[in-house]
Image: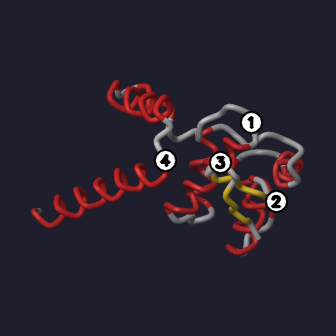
Amino acid sequence: MLEISEHRNGAIIMTGNFGKFIEEKRKAYGMTLRGLAAELGIAPAFMSDIEKGHRYPPNKEKLYELARILHLSEADTNTMFDLAASEKENTVSPDLPEYIMNSNNVRVALRLARDRGIPDAAWQKVIDMLEAEETKESQSE
């Protein structure tokens, strides 16, 4: 099972890897490796190498396909993206770069947070504010 632990500087470190995560989700869904490979349009040997950690995770489009095929929840999809990014050094989860680069405010906020060493507790306040705003908007509809 995938484990998530906290590093001494507060950063979250995911132990386990992308391939193990996909294998667990595939088996939980009751799908064979060959079946998943066929759905993705890749060779079974290639899929096997991904699950064994011998190859990098696939591109963003294939990751979205994996999420769809395996019926991953939003949380599991986000975990999958984070694990895919963790396989490569200095890589951001593949679902985020376009959003980050299309918003000047997001880039400014991230750089300010980085430069000022904003702790997780401050980010949690931002998350809470965003979730409260989403709840307020859905109630007004």
Image: 99 above or below 7 = above
Front label number (4 vs 2): 4
Disc 2 versus disc 3: distance between alpha carbons?
Answer: 41 Å
State the quadrant of the C terminus. Answer: bottom left
Front label number (2 vs 3): 3
Disc 3 versus disc 4: distance between alpha carbons?
Answer: 10 Å
Image mark for residue 88: 1
- Mark 2 is surrounded, within 10 Å at the Cα level, by few (under 14), some (14 to 19) or many (20 or more) other residues, namely some
Give the mark, 3 or 1, whose residue is nearer the N terminus: 3
Q: Secondary structure at mark 1?
A: loop
Disc 4 versus disc 1: distance between alpha carbons?
Answer: 24 Å
Q: Is residue 71 left or right of residue 105?
A: right
Q: Amino acid at mark 2?
A: Arg
**Residue at the spot 70% in from the left edge and 61% down from the top edge:** 5
Q: Are marks 4 and 2 in contact (CB under 8 Å)?
A: no
**Residue at the spot 76% in from the left edge and 71% down from the top edge:** 1
Disc 3 versus disc 1: distance between alpha carbons?
Answer: 20 Å
Give the mark, 4 or 2, whose residue is nearer the N terminus: 2
Q: Which residue is mark 3?
A: 9
Q: Amino acid at mark 1?
A: Lys
Q: Secondary structure at mark 2?
A: helix
Q: Amino acid at mark 4?
A: Pro
Image mark for residue 34: 2
Where is residue 49 drawn, in percent x and y?
88, 48
**Residue at the spot 49% in from the left edge and 61% down from the top edge:** 74
**Residue at the spot 49% in from the left edge and 51% down from the top edge:** 120
Q: Which residue is mark 4?
A: 119
Give the mark, 2 or 1, whose residue is nearer the N terminus: 2
Q: Are marks 2 and 1 in contact (CB under 8 Å)?
A: no
Image: 130 above or below 85 = below
